[in-house]
Image: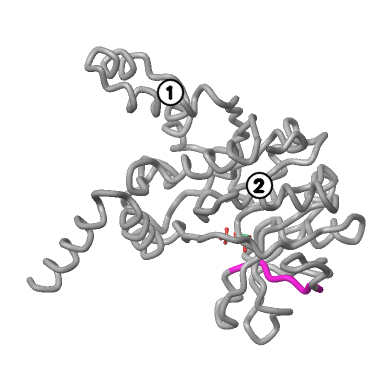
Amino acid sequence: MSETIRKCLFPVAGLGTRFLPATKEIAKEMLPLVDRPIIAYGVEEALSAGCREMVMITGRTKKAIEDYFDRSFELEEMLKARNKTSLYDEVISLAELADFIYMRQHRPLGLGHAVLCGEPVCGREYFGVILPDDVMIARPSVLAQLISVHERLGGSVVALEEVPQEETSRYGVVKAEEKYPGIFAIEDMVEKPAPMTAPSNLAIMGRYVLSPSIFPILARLGTGSGGEIQLTDGIKVLLEEEPVWGVIFKGRRYDCGTQPGWLAANIQLAMDQPGLKEVVLKAVADAQNS
Ligand code: G1P
């Protein structure tokens, strides 16, 4: 378990327009993934990587996230009275295991700007970043895999996955040289390049260990791809000053930032759970026969 990275930042201010109307009044991070909200997977990952301070960069309509990671007196009393001890433990555990800090991103200026909003809390030490839309199932967790590279080699670290060339325009993409098996020294990166101009097909997935030197860089960065302040552009400047490593992580990734990805993740994760596999298979068979 990491002694070095105590804080993990979660950018959760996005409006979730891809999930409208479901997300008109609730945060997309609160949509359920089988038995818990999407955000809970990210927080559990950060906990298992040793982080104990969760820094949520929030916006309007995100109040349910704060309530979810708080104690709920009425619910706890009801579960206790009904002897539902395992549910009781589950409900209180996340609220007890970490400190939750909430900061507002007042304007939707992009991922780089969201990270910059965390400077007052994260500005003095290396910190983790989890984009909760990318749900990662891995052991050790993907953030823990990144932290162990940071502890071994120093510098910042991003998670990488090979993607089909035609998908490069959905991601930050790196130019990098493999120095150790699965570990790349990053030389350049570009946000959402067209397939023809992408420097490789190694894409950044939503996990980072970042140096606090990123903050002054983000503060003076202009807008980039999509008219937003891009984290990828900030890390590109950072790597002129400090090493940045890329790690091909081991584990499964589910893209819960789109409706098809979220739906597929629900089905696939349900298939892993005892008792639910049969339910999924029967529902699919029934749907095909109707
Ligand atoms: C963000 C980052 C991008 C990264 C992606 C991973 O993009 O800007 O570099 O590859 O997350 O999911 P977004 O998905 O917010 O457009």
| Residue 71, image quadrant | top left
The kind of residue tagged 1 is Ile
Q: With respect to residue 238, does 4 lie above or below? A: above
Q: Callout 2: 10 Å neighbours few (<14), some, many (20+)?
A: many
Q: With respect to residue 154, does 281 lie above or below? A: below
Q: Is residue 71 left or right of residue 284?
A: right
Q: With respect to residue 127, does 140 lie above or below? A: below
The span from disc 2 to disc 1 (Cα, nearest Å) is 24 Å
Quadrant of the snapshot with the C terminus: bottom left
Q: Is residue 106 visible?
A: no
Q: Determine which residue is flagged by label 1.
A: 92
Q: Which residues are magenta?
A: 171-177
Residue 144's disc number: 2
Q: Residue furthest left?
A: 290
Disc with the residue nearer the chain's start (2 vs 1): 1
Magenta stretch: helix, strand or loop mostly: strand
Numbered disc 2: secondary structure: helix
Q: Is residue 40 left or right of residue 162?
A: left
Residue located 69% across and 44% down the image:
128
Q: Please check the rendered image and state whether residue 174 is part of the magenta-colored stretch, yes or no.
A: yes
Contact between marks 2 and 1 (CB within 8 A): the answer is no
Q: Is residue 129 visible?
A: yes
The kind of residue tagged 2 is Ala
Q: Of residues 251 and 69, which is closer to you in this image?
A: 251
